[in-house]
Image: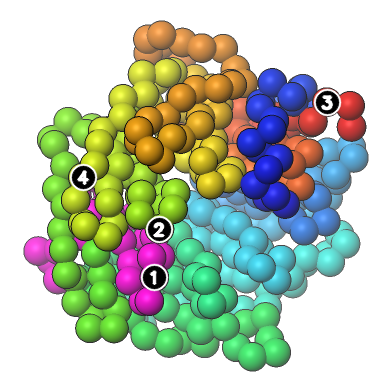
Amino acid sequence: METNNFWNNHTLNDFQLLSILDDIHSSEIFSVCFLKDGRIASSSRDNNVLIYNKRTFKIEIRIRERKSIFYMNINRDGILITCMRGTYVNLYEIKGKRYSNIQTIRPYSLKFDIIGIFDGAYYIKKFIELKNGDIAILDRGYTISFYKKKKKSKKYSYLNQFKEDEDGLEIITDLCELDDNQYCLNDHSGKLIKFLDWNKKIITDTIEFEKNFYNIDTNSELLLMNKKDLFVTGSYSIIIVDVQKKEIIKKLDLHISGYLTYIGKLSDNIIIAGFWNDYIGQFEYDKNTKNLKLISNIGEKHTHRKSAIYDITSISIFKNNLIVSPYKNSLYGSSLIVYQLKNK
């Protein structure tokens, strides 16, 4: 986002439908993002990354991976990074209608790297770009691999690794960077989070949640609103954790439109959230009362779960002018929907 003030003065009501890109992927879209030049990129379970002309939305580039792509985004250099079912991460430099693979990162050991060619159980869940420009890569196991950004280069070199034992996190699905080499981690079940002190290389604290906080087979996410308040997403709710005291502050129920599937920060007190049923909501956070207020939305509001469920897995915003998200996003085929700021 360019400025925090934009989203304190504008709502989703200030946007209008620009385009629907029908049936562009043959399976579920996991990630969308904007390139630095404003072009949209989408990635899917169908092994494809698609990049679209920013005016006509025609497909300009198709990158075919060997596996399903579970996560994709650009880093500060504008390099497109794909994380997939398999044991490696690809870095692509995009120039015009051409792309080049500038690096492949393999965080797994050689043994599991080879096994992963044939066994779909091994995959890279996500990468997180850290404040210093390094990245943390989360694999399916118990491991976080840190890679250092090379000087005067767009590539990374292996730095170090944190590995939990089998009594620790089953699958680390998200990582949130705090201060001074402190991290918060959560697991696939959404039933607990842990605090990692990387200076000491140990888990210092654990917070467990109630059994029914998360009850579906998708992923709980972490979002740091300020130095103190951490959001942990559940199926229908958000738990606010005080990361300084390492304790739960409050649970906020969000019975808006089916399950909560995506969350992102727009400003210091505004978030955007995606739900099943193609519903996007904008919420204002009051850090004093620890409450969220729905202030605008896009999509039809559903009060109960319907048989046809479509999943907003990802939302991306370009210079506060364009919003893109999956639309009618299912295992059998998916579209994109693009919104534009009015009077643009």
Pinpoint residue 119: horizontal percent, then vertical percent: 34, 61
Question: Which segment is the magenta one?
Answer: 165-194
Q: Which residue is mark 3?
A: 342
In the image, residue 322 sits, relative to residue 145, either above or below, namely: above
Report the front residue among 287 and 140. 287
Q: What's the amino acid at mark 4? A: Ile
Question: How packed is label 1: few (under 14 Cα within 10 Å), some, or many (20 or more)?
Answer: few
Magenta-drawn stretch contains 234: no
- The quadrant of the rendering that contains the C terminus is top right
Q: Which residue is mark 2?
A: 227
Q: What's the amino acid at mark 2? A: Lys
In primary-sequence order, the first of circles 3 and 4 is 4
In the image, residue 87 sits, relative to residue 294, either above or below, namely: below
Q: Which residue is mark 4?
A: 248
Pinpoint residue 330: horizontal percent, then vertical percent: 51, 29
Left or right: residue 255 compared with residue 266? left
Q: Residue at x 40, y 40 (%)?
A: 287
**Residue contact at pointers 1 and 2, CB within 8 angstroms:** yes
Q: Kindly give the residue lying farthest to the bottom in the view shown.
A: 151
Question: Viewer-nearest of labels 3 and 2?
Answer: 2
Pinpoint residue 97: horizontal percent, then vertical percent: 86, 59
In primary-sequence order, the first of circles 3 and 2 is 2
